[in-house]
């Protein structure tokens, strides 16, 4: 199915996996549980 294609394309092996894309290019990727402050630190520079 479509979901399997996407997970294979981006090598998603664990949940949660969060990826930030800017202009179609992956800029950040975080796998596994992360506290909110860490998510903000990783993604805020790109927003």
Image (spheres, rainbow, N blue to C red):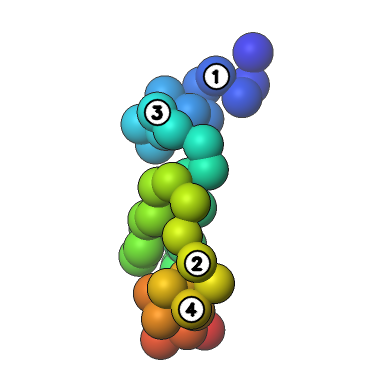
4 vs 1, front mark: 4
Answer with mark 1 or mark 3, whichever residue precedes in sequence.
Answer: 1
Q: CA distance from mark 4 to mark 2?
A: 6 Å
CB contact under 8 Å: marks 1 and 2: no
1 vs 3, front mark: 3
Q: Is residue 1 above or below residue 30?
A: above
Specify the label residue 4 is tagged with.
1
Answer with mark 3 or mark 2, whichever residue precedes in sequence.
Answer: 3
Answer with mark 3 or mark 4, whichever residue precedes in sequence.
Answer: 3
User: Which residue occupies 41% across, 81% down?
Assistant: 41
User: Which residue occupies 43% across, 46% down?
Assistant: 32
Specify the label residue 13 is tagged with.
3
User: Which residue occupies 40% across, 28% down?
Assistant: 13
Q: Is residue 32 above or below residue 25?
A: above
Count residues near mark 4 (Cα–Cα under 10 Å), then give few for <14, some for 14-19, many for 20+.
few
Residue 44 pos. (x, y %): 47, 84
Residue under label 4, please give it.
Answer: 37
Residue under label 2, please give it.
Answer: 35
3 vs 4, front mark: 4
Residue 28 pos. (x, y %): 36, 63
CB contact under 8 Å: marks 4 and 1: no
Q: Is residue 14 above or below residue 47?
A: above
CB contact under 8 Å: marks 4 and 2: yes
| Residue 34 in view here | yes
Q: CA distance from mark 1 to mark 2?
A: 27 Å
Q: Most extreme residue toward the top, as rendered?
A: 1
Q: CA distance from mark 3 to mark 2?
A: 20 Å
1 vs 2, front mark: 2
């Amino acid at each position: 199915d479509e979901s399997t294609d996407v997970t294979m394309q981006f090598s998603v092996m664990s949940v949660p996996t969060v990826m930030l894309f800017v202009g179609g290019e992956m800029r950040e990727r975080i796998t596994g549980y992360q506290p909110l402050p860490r998510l903000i630190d990783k993604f805020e520079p790109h927003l």
